[in-house]
Image (spheres, helix red, strand yellow):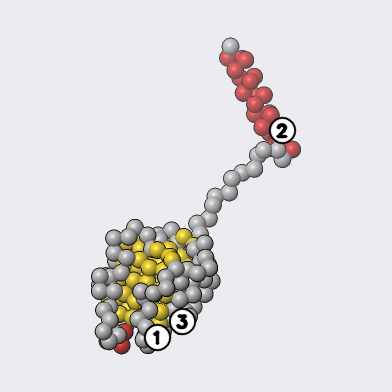
Amino acid sequence: MKACAAKAAVVRVAALVGCAAAGVGMALATPALATPSPYPNLDGYQRESNLEPFRVIDQRGVWLTTPMGLRCGIDDDGSYGCSGTLPGAPPGDNEVAWFVGDPFPRQYHTDQPRFDSGVTQNLLIGLSYVQFRGSTCAVTKESGIYCSHENDPNSQLMVTNEMTFRGGDATPSS
């Protein structure tokens, strides 16, 4: 019985070697490389500690405009978002936002943008950020906007010149 088992094992190995030599069915799986996150590391960014320039008369929260022309805000409850053209988003979607209690940032069309104050908002320049009520919004060196709330990775959103990303896994808009 042992002789039969040993002979069967030799036949299986020989078959595998023969297939490998012929290039049949022996492709080795290459490990998948992790895609780097598009979200920036804010080390080295300059914090705007004086929020007064980012206040708007008769509006709650802080307001800013990005070099890309997006109008963004952080509300008194820590919710944040941006209004304007969202690269990669379906036609008509003009706002991306995260609201306190939401598990994931929303992207949608609105005729009344919540994160556009309707008046002049100060420009936040690249490699700088504002923090307000537990939320942070930063402008990248490429003029994109990145926002997150405290240590909640699912609250993250980012709008670049090419794409809008949302959530901890940086889901691209579509």
Residue type at the position of mark 1: Leu
Labelled disc at residue 18: 2
CA–CA distance in space, label 2 to label 3: 63 Å
Where's residue 135, x and y in %? 30, 71
Q: Earlier in the sequence, mark 2 or mark 3?
A: 2
Relative depth, front residue between 95 and 12:
95
Residue type at the position of mark 3: Gly
Q: Earlier in the sequence, mark 3 or mark 1?
A: 3
Q: Nearer the viewer, mark 2 or mark 3?
A: 3
Labelled disc at residue 163: none
Q: Residue furthest right?
A: 22
Q: Earlier in the sequence, mark 1 or mark 2?
A: 2
Relative depth, front residue between 109 and 29:
109
Relative depth, front residue between 156 and 4:
156
Where's residue 145, x and y in %? 42, 75
* Residue at the disc numbered 3: 69
Identify the residue at horizontal 69%, vertical 29% (top origin).
15
Give neighbour class at mark 1: few <14, some 14-19, many 20+ (Cα, 10 Å): some
